[in-house]
Image (cartoon, rainbow, N blue to C red):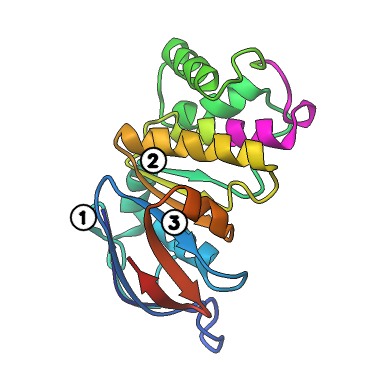
């Protein structure tokens, strides 16, 4: 699903590498914890995997496509197969919950009737079937995170990325979000979850990628 060969990422030519000579492989259908302290490079690695940036050096393959050499026009179709759960939710405040979740399907050109049915089903799956018309500001942090998750998975992504999805949640809400991510994994998505919460990984054993100062120090 993902292969990084000697990847280095700099945001400016003269800057210290955010990622430094990273090598790893993620198998299709795997579940992986991406761990490390703040500033370790977790968000930078996720930006690479969601095709928001390209490596400064090295070779990046996502779903058998060579991202480091791909043309810009080839990337949007690939991005539509990648779901992202952002740490800050990134829900649109002027849209209700249903419209926020339906947005990726609308952008992809899905028919109106079908996209609303799919978005409604996904909101019921995350336990928010009664909040379809609520605005984001009317929801708790845990509810907003579940809306963000529903939006990320409504198009049934092959690759699902979550950036610190439990950082602002209490323990009970954290467990619920992780359980939903695990369900997506069981349904066939390759899942990568960035977290600094060691207890989450201990409670839910899976492969670990551990970064420190932009270097990969654990892969197993």
According to the picture, the residue beneath numbered tag 3 turns out to be: 33
Q: Which residues are magenta?
A: 133-148
Left or right? Give the position of 3 relative to 49. left
**Helix, strand or loop: magenta stretch:** helix
Of the two numbered discs 1 and 3 on the same chain, state the one appearing first in sequence: 3
Task: Measure how far apart labels 2 and 1 are at the Cα level.
Answer: 15 Å
Task: Measure how far apart labels 2 and 3 are at the Cα level.
Answer: 22 Å
Q: Residues within 10 Å of mark 3 (few under 14, many from 20)?
A: many
> Does the magenta segment cover residue 135?
yes
Nearer mark to the viewer, of 1 and 3 = 3
Asked if residue 91 can be seen in this view, the reply is no
According to the picture, the residue beneath numbered tag 1 turns out to be: 64
Nearer mark to the viewer, of 2 and 3 = 3
Residue name at image x 41 percent, y 77 percent: 217
Residue name at image x 30 percent, y 62 percent: 67
- Secondary element type, mark 2: loop
According to the picture, the residue beneath numbered tag 2 turns out to be: 80
Which residue is most to the bottom?
A: 14
Of the two numbered discs 2 and 3 on the same chain, state the one appearing first in sequence: 3
Q: Are marks 1 and 3 in contact (CB under 8 Å)?
A: no
The C terminus: image quadrant: bottom left
Q: Residues within 10 Å of mark 2 (few under 14, many from 20)?
A: some
Find residue 137 and report its horizontal and vertical position in percent: 78, 31
Which residue is most to the right?
A: 138
Asked if residue 158 can be seen in this view, the reply is yes
């Amino acid at each position: 699903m993902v292969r990084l060969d000697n990847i280095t990422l700099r945001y400016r030519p003269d800057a210290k590498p955010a990622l430094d000579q990273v090598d790893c492989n993620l198998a299709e259908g795997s579940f992986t914890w991406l761990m490390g302290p703040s500033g370790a490079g977790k968000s930078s690695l996720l930006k690479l995997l969601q095709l928001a940036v390209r490596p400064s050096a090295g070779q990046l393959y996502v779903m058998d496509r060579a991202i480091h050499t791909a043309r810009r026009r080839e990337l949007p179709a690939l991005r539509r197969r990648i779901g992202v759960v952002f740490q800050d939710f990134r829900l649109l405040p002027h849209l209700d919950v249903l419209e926020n979740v339906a947005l990726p399907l609308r952008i992809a050109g899905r028919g109106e009737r079908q996209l609303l049915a799919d978005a409604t089903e996904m909101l019921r799956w995350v336990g928010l079937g009664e909040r379809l018309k609520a605005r984001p500001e009317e929801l708790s942090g845990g509810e907003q995170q579940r809306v963000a998750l529903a939006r990320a998975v409504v198009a049934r992504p092959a690759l699902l990325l979550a950036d610190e999805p439990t950082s602002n949640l209490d323990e009970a809400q954290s467990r619920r979000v992780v359980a939903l991510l695990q369900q997506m994994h069981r349904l066939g998505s390759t899942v990568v979850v960035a977290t600094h919460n060691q207890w989450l990984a201990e409670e839910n054993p899976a492969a670990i990628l551990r970064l420190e100062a932009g270097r990969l120090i654990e892969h197993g």
